[in-house]
Amino acid sequence: MPVLPVLHEVVPEGGLRPGSVTVVEGSPALALALTAGLEERWCAVVGLPEAHIPAAASMGGDPMRVLLVDDPGRRWADVVAALTDGCALVLTRPPDRPAPQVVRRLTALARRNGCALVVTGPWEGANLRLRVEEGHWSGLGTGTGHLRGRRALVVSSGRGAAGPGRRVWLWLPAPDGTVAPAAEIPEAIPETPSRAPVAVAG
Amino acid sequence: MIPPRALVVWCPDWPVTAIGLDAATPAAVVSGAQVEACSAAARASGVRRGQRVRDAQRHCPELVVRDRDTDAEGRLFESVAAAVSGVTPWVEVVRPGICAIPVRGAARYHGGGTTGAGDEESLRVHVQDTVVEQGFDCGAGIADGLFAAELAARAGEGGVVVPPGGTPAFLAPYPVSVLGRPELTGLLSRLGIRTLGAFAALPVRDVTARFGVDEIRAHRLARGLYPRPPAPRPPLADLSVSTEFDPPAVAAEQVVFAAKSLAERLHEALAAEALTCVRVGVEVTGADGRTLTRLWRHDGALSALAVAERVRWQLSSWETQGEDGQEGGVVLLRLLPDQLVADDGRQEALWGEATVSDQIARAAARVQAMLGHQAITRPFPAGGRGPGERVVRVPFGDLPPEPAAEGPWPGRVPDPPPAVVHPEPLPATVTDADGSPVLVDARCAVSAPPHEVEIAGRRHLVTAWAGPWPARERWWDPARAHRRARFQVVTGDDRAHLLVFEGGHWHVEAGYA
């Protein structure tokens, strides 16, 4: 499954393999960014009623090819299993830590049906783990401006080809809502709240 | 061909009646900025159909203005149609506010026996009284054909009877605008033809040579000819089909097999009426008295096998729902067509909208079988100031809403959109440097810069903030009115939040994590 080109740095092989499980920690925006590069394929979002699809759409995703199941309840595993048949990617948060046999069944089904799983939550044996280690928002002053973007340090770790510790600075999101490569922030940024507000246009 | 005699019942100002206002209240029903209908009292003060609302209000300052409610019009008119069907069962509802019955037979039955003008007059009065007894003001008129009968219903005090063959003479003095074709009216009046009589006097050959099909139809109307007789239609039969299982069916296969033949029967019954249904309801009753009903999208696109497959999915969801699903088995299976519409074929989208592949439809239908029709949705863009209002979730298979108004939405929170919008806003507290709560007054002035935010019991220092973006929405509707101010804040853990201040309380509406 293709991902946005800017994510190639942290997602090995230029995409997510069918049947692979990617765990995204702590950043819903990063999870949505993974759904944005699917081009003509469908994706499903299961058990994440708070996911804001317009954010994925502004990153390049097609909101018309999204299925949402906000509350799968006790039938979470059955819903994900049904949606792997047809969707190229299922973004989901398990209601609790899934049992090993459920994990095995879902990954086997996903591999057979050509679907990648992206999980925001506990999961044993993920192929790839992505997280945002550091983020710096810009555009906001003290009572002035508005949020324009965030420079985020995305770090990946995983098994096999994924290897340990790739990292990349990204605009997540950029001022126009997309995901874009960002220059590394110099170390000299003071940690205190007295940080000078970034100049705001408009 | 002279059309058959028809009786038309016309309820004046039906859109106004339907929203529960009487003729004595000066009221207008509007759509957009134009008056669609007005009450008699409003008309007396100069309000007219097609007027702009502000002009109408200038003529009649105490005017009650309401939005048009076409659903209510149809619903309420059902009681008029039911009352008229007590006179004769062959009632045709032309549109809410107007219905028609064929006169032949009914006049003989309700009159004295010999056919004559007296019979028709007594039928007319009888029908009118029947409707007035229901509490609705109405006019009733009889003429050759629906068009003339409708004008006859509006003529005189509560309608007239136009004698047989007298229709052309009755129509002649009416202006051409009653044909309801504004373009043709404009053209004819430029030609100096102002009445139906003058229009009818034009030779058919010339009209046919000069005008199109629709104008030829109008010409036939003006001459008192009407190609379409009122379509007599018996009260709509119950088209639902059901089958009982005695002894109760324990195996799902048995029910599914019965469902297939049941669906075939349903489709035949619908096809015989030239109808199709938008949705089909499947009702399964168990031996223990439990009933499970689900609505499935149909749109005339499902084969009998596909309906049976949905019954199977529904049964499978039942079995896993209760621990004793197999106990007792199924005693009754019913298929109910919902939202009947005329069957006029189907046209796939040519381009533009992403078509849903069979594979996706199947996966979605399986989820619907497990959790119900509402459980799986598709997001569609909508208009609004808050991020949560910019998307609506429509159950899979339902029609998308009207395209969003591309309004400027002043006070909208600027892009980029947040990644997370909480379905229920999280309560929060915002305090200033002294530890006292930050407030926003009616003029959108902030009492002090926010210093600390507490969300879900955890406190964060505010490193940057902006706002307020005020939004005062739907002040005309007390139930849905909102008056709030939005703030963006960045907290010490480098997360950004969208906070809302409303009614003295702070909430987290969305997050940018």
Image (cartoon, grey):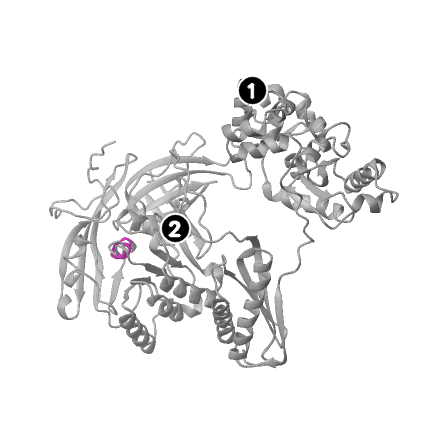
In the rendered structure, which segment of residues is drawn in magenta? Answer: A29-35
Give the SS element for disc 2.
loop
- Would residue A97 appear left or right of B476 to someone viewing this image? left
Q: Name the residue that disc number 2 marks.
A: B349
The answer to which of B285 and B113 lies nearer the viewer is: B113
Q: Amino acid at mark 1?
A: Ser
Q: Residue drawn 29% across and 43% down? A: B416
Q: Was residue A32 drawn as part of the magenta stretch in this picture?
A: yes
Q: As displayed, is residue B209 above or below residue A183?
A: above
| Residue B23 horizontal/vertical position (percent) | 71, 30
Are there few (<14), some (14-19), or many (20+) residues within 10 Å of tag 2?
Answer: few
Give coordinates of residue B132: x percent, y percent: 78, 39
Where disc 1 sits, the SS reads helix
Badge 1: how crowded within 10 Å, few (<14), some, or many (20+)?
A: some
Q: Quadrant of the N terminus of chain B?
A: top right
Q: Earlier in the sequence, mark 1 or mark 2?
A: 1
